[in-house]
Image (cartoon, grey):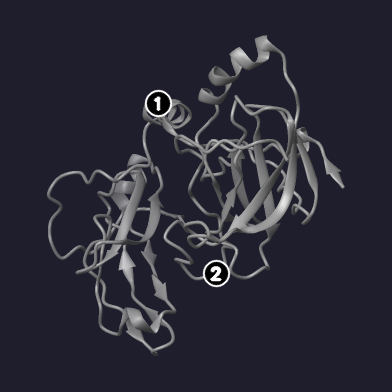
Amino acid sequence: MRIGGATALALLLMPPAGDVFAAQAVDPPTPTPTGAQLSARPGERLTFAVASSLPGKNGNWVSSEIFIEHGTLRMNDPVITAVATVACDTPPGVYLVEQTGPGGPPKGAKGDVWVTVKVADIGEAERKACPGMVAALPPEQPDERWPAGDSWPQSPWDVRTFKPGDKVTPTASDAELGFGKTLASPGFTDQPVMSGAKAVLTATATIRCDAQPGLYEVRWVGRNEVWARYRVAQTDDATRRACQDHATEPATGQLTPWLVGGAAALAAAGVGTYVLVRRRRGTSR
């Protein structure tokens, strides 16, 4: 089965409307069949997809010697998708694409072969223009889009959008996180405490009225890793004046969120990824 490169290409920029990553909605990609052969040109970005109903796929790596960097499968309801870009110096030939668990395969092991990619031969002019084309590609959007009815968060990148003053319910299904533990986020009015049954723990948090639009992190108090992320939406002045968050302490100035990055920084990151990432080379298969 052969799938054209144009069909496989997609840009995964699907954040909430109005933020810096805003993009037009596109039809979801069709799940990539195991054993399929994709066609691509050097510098082309490929999209790989699996059905969202398949368990244990979120976070898996999609790797090949021809990719500038591995792709990561992320929930993009109604499918799970990953993107990867074919390196500009890839010789023509057919190459394997493997799927592994998060972090890649164990040392000395190989991943499961998913599909193959047939890379076309290109002329000298196109190859010279390739690095500039890759640098101009929009950066991959790490936000995951889970079904609205699912509890939040399903993963650290399950980024939902809230308004100042909204009450939200962080939910944990991992008993190891612990009853009575607290959460901290600069966008919350306080540090909510998780409670409930051992299998499902919840807390109620309120988004501060002075929280500025952008991306925020949620951490467990006493732990260094990010547990969840959310976006605060842009609101008008009238809505902010009417906002009530019942904060126990007065605001100490405007809160600045941790943002994924401005447009200039993201463009620079795209250039840096192409220039700095070194990948292993191999012979054509």
**Residue at the bottom extreme of this rendering:** 197
The reply to whether dot 2 and dot 1 touch (C-beta < 8 Å) is no
User: Residue 268, which numbered label?
Assistant: 1
Q: Is residue 52 above or below residue 256?
A: below
| Residue situated in front as seen by the camera: 37 or 109 | 109
In the rendered image, which residue does mark 2 sit on? 150
Secondary structure category for the residue under label 1: helix
- Residue 40 horizontal/vertical position (percent): 73, 32
Amino acid on which the number 2 mark rests in the picture: Asp
- Residue 77 horizontal/vertical position (percent): 63, 57
Left or right of 32 in this view: 16: left
Question: Considering the image in quadrants, where does the C terminus appear?
Answer: top right
Q: Is residue 231 above or below residue 46?
A: below
Residue drawn at (79%, 54%), measured in percent from left and top? Answer: 35
Front: mark 2 or 1: 1
Residue drawn at (64%, 29%), measured in percent from left and top? Answer: 90
Badge 2 or badge 1: first in the primary sequence = 2
Residue drawn at (31%, 52%), measured in percent from left and top? Answer: 242
Quarter-of-image position of residue 264: top left
Secondary structure category for the residue under label 2: loop
| Residue situated in front as seen by the camera: 109 or 176 | 109
Whole-number angstrom distance, CA of label 2 to CA of label 1: 35 Å
Left or right of 219 in this view: 141: right
